[in-house]
Amino acid sequence: MKNKGTLFLVQAALIAAVYVVLTLVFAPFSYGEIQVRISEALTILPFFTPAAIPGLFVGCILANLLGGAIPLDIAFGSIATLIGAVFTYKLRNSSKWLAPVPPIVANAVLVPFVLRYGYSVNLPIPLMMLTVGAGEIISCGIFGMVLLTALSKYKNTLFGKQAAAK
């Protein structure tokens, strides 16, 4: 594709769409104080392409809007995903095993405060950090790493030359 801007936009839009679909299809597991948001496996994609950063952010905003989240959750839940995506991108030239760490940490730290102060979940914040963190370990650390391993073989075809250096 000659126009890199178009490729970037298409990749971001596709990632956002897949994030929304996965979140809504698995909605019973995607929301709440104990959640395994399968779509968070996609947070490893900044390892391959910077287009994943806005794609994941917009996808999370839309999934939270369509899933009935409150404004605090739409904002800060999406910011947690954005932070995770940005730092995954920054770690792309490090070990692939570091790719899921930023989204796990960002969500485990931010989401419990949203649950407490936005949804009035009356559980201790450290406990919610553990439950949200455990869900993120499953979705990012396990499913995300399976996805990263599967996509590594096809990274140049899927993501173009920007993924060639890895």
Image (cartoon, helix red, strand yellow):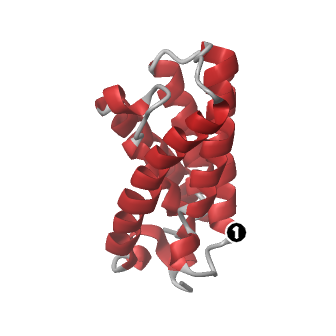
Q: Does residue 53 lie above or below 28 as drawn?
A: below
Is residue 76 visible to the viewer in this orientation of the structure? Answer: yes
Q: Does residue 46 lie above or below 14 as drawn?
A: below
Quadrant of the rendered image containing residue 152? bottom left
Q: Does residue 126 lie above or below 155 as drawn?
A: above
Give percent across and percent down for residue 8: 57, 57
Q: Does residue 137 lie above or below 59 as drawn?
A: below
Q: Residue at x 52, y 40 (%)?
A: 132
Q: Nearer the viewer, residue 128 or 159?
A: 128
Give percent across and percent down for residue 35: 43, 35
Report the residue marked by disc 1: 90
Q: Nearer the viewer, residue 165 or 94?
A: 94
Residue 139 located left or right of residue 84: left
Give percent across and percent down for residue 63: 48, 29
Q: Residue at x 53, y 62 (%)?
A: 100
Is residue 3 visible to the viewer in this orientation of the structure? Answer: no
Give percent across and percent down for residue 6: 56, 55
Secondary element at image label 1: helix
